[in-house]
Amino acid sequence: MWGLSLVTKTGRQDDDWQRAILHVILSEAKNLSRDETLRFDQGDKLTQYPVAIWPSKLQRMNGSTFMNHVLEMTSENSTGVIGLLNDVFRTSRGVTDQNMATDYPLVFAENNFRFCRLIELDGKVVSHAAIWPRELVVDGERYKVGVLVAVATDPDYRKRNLAATLVQSLMDSLHAEEYDFAVLWTGVPGFYEKLGWHAVSTGGELVTLSRETVLSSVQENKEYAISPFQPDRHLTGVMKLHDDEPLRFARSPDDAAGLLTIPKYSNWVAEKDGEVAAYVVHAHGVNRLGITEYGGEQSGVLHLIKHVMHGLPAGAELPWFLYPDQQDLRTWSQQQGFSTRPLESSKGRGTEMHYIINKARVTPELANRFFVWGVDQA
Ligand SMILES: CC(C)(COP(=O)(O)OP(=O)(O)OC[C@H]1O[C@@H](n2cnc3c(N)ncnc32)[C@H](O)[C@@H]1OP(=O)(O)O)[C@@H](O)C(=O)NCCC(=O)NCCS
């Protein structure tokens, strides 16, 4: 794979532009050696961005690119998109009680339709990919992050470069809109490596909680009033606890309300003196499982975990995501002797991958610290 750098006018992505660029790259590429930089200059108001290109792809794209087939989601084609995604990610895996539209309410919200891209062939939606635009806050500093989600091609239309075209179109937009970096979780890292993404490993541990150990080791504390999360009563208190995290995705009240009411989450709060002292998210979906998010004082979190475990059958076990910064909870977990393994990715499974856009801002040190917190996983 070569590292090339294109300099071009923001927004020009039509057919002629593509053909012109590909023509220049193809004629220049044979003279380039690995890692050399090609500058392609189209006048003033320039944006510069690196593009990972390899010769066989270039030849193919030059012959038949699907870039001019890329559409944005609309209320008309949304049914076709969700139908394709449900077929690929839900029904074909035997899951009939979850729907991609309600599992990812902020991705498929109308204000994000421009970042939900699709290709229609033979009168139907055959490929889709989306970006969920977020803002990562690290020690008060804000970064623009694109979360790549819901990438799928109809099985009858695979290996025609459709998904790669959609992902590339989204990556072009992230560059044009000066995002800092992008993240995804996948079972097919090879597909994304070809597009310039790289696999990362996150810190943290996946603990297997055992019901009986939790019930016997967490002592009763009558100070806490435990109840199911209710947005109108608890949203502000839960958001405040989340906002105290040194590393988190920023959430507006609408974001937080949307995320905390996704189907297959049971969320609990512990109140003390009328204030939300702690909360936990218990996920039980095909794509999310376990205690994935929690916040507030440690003993409150443990009380809530005990409450969740109490509701499970005897002998039950439950995954618990111990994030890298949770040293006190890790110590408690070690004392209980739970079985533990390193978290494969901040989602608990699959390969986590990054695509760094602004290398000056997103240093390797920051990228190593990066972690997606609980309900922000896609
Ligand atoms: C993964 C998936 C989206 C690929 O869609 P597609 O439209 O067939 O992909 P493309 O034709 O654009 O593939 C582009 C390149 O990636 C390669 N590729 C495709 N699927 C791949 C895979 N599973 N592993 C490794 N490489 C893969 C292709 O061979 C092609 O490489 P080439 O140009 O060198 O031949 C599709 O197989 C799918 O929907 N899978 C099920 C859902 C899924 O796993 N989605 C990803 C979740 S994050």
Image (cartoon, rainbow, N blue to C red):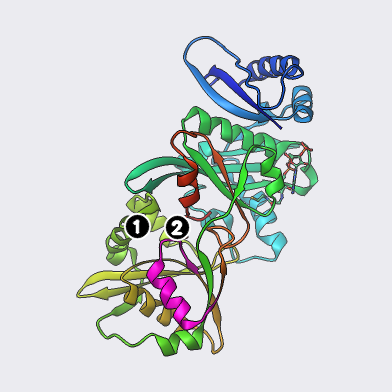
Identify the secondary structure beneath mark 1: loop
Asked if residue 21 shows in the view, the reply is yes
109 vs 173, nearest the viewer: 173
Q: Which residues are magenta?
A: 321-339
Q: Is residue 189 left or right of residue 134?
A: right
Q: Residue at x 36, y 80 (%)?
A: 303
Asked if residue 10 shows in the view, the reply is no
Q: Residue at x 46, y 46 (%)?
A: 365
Q: Is residue 323 left or right of residue 220?
A: right
Residue highlighted by disc 1? 245
Label tally: 2
Give the percent coordinates (x, y) of residue 197.
62, 41
Q: Is mark 2 within 8 Å of ligand 1?
A: no
Give the percent coordinates (x, y) of residue 97.
60, 66
Tell me the quadrant of ligand 1: top right
121 vs 373, nearest the viewer: 373
Q: Is residue 338 rendered magenta in the image? A: yes
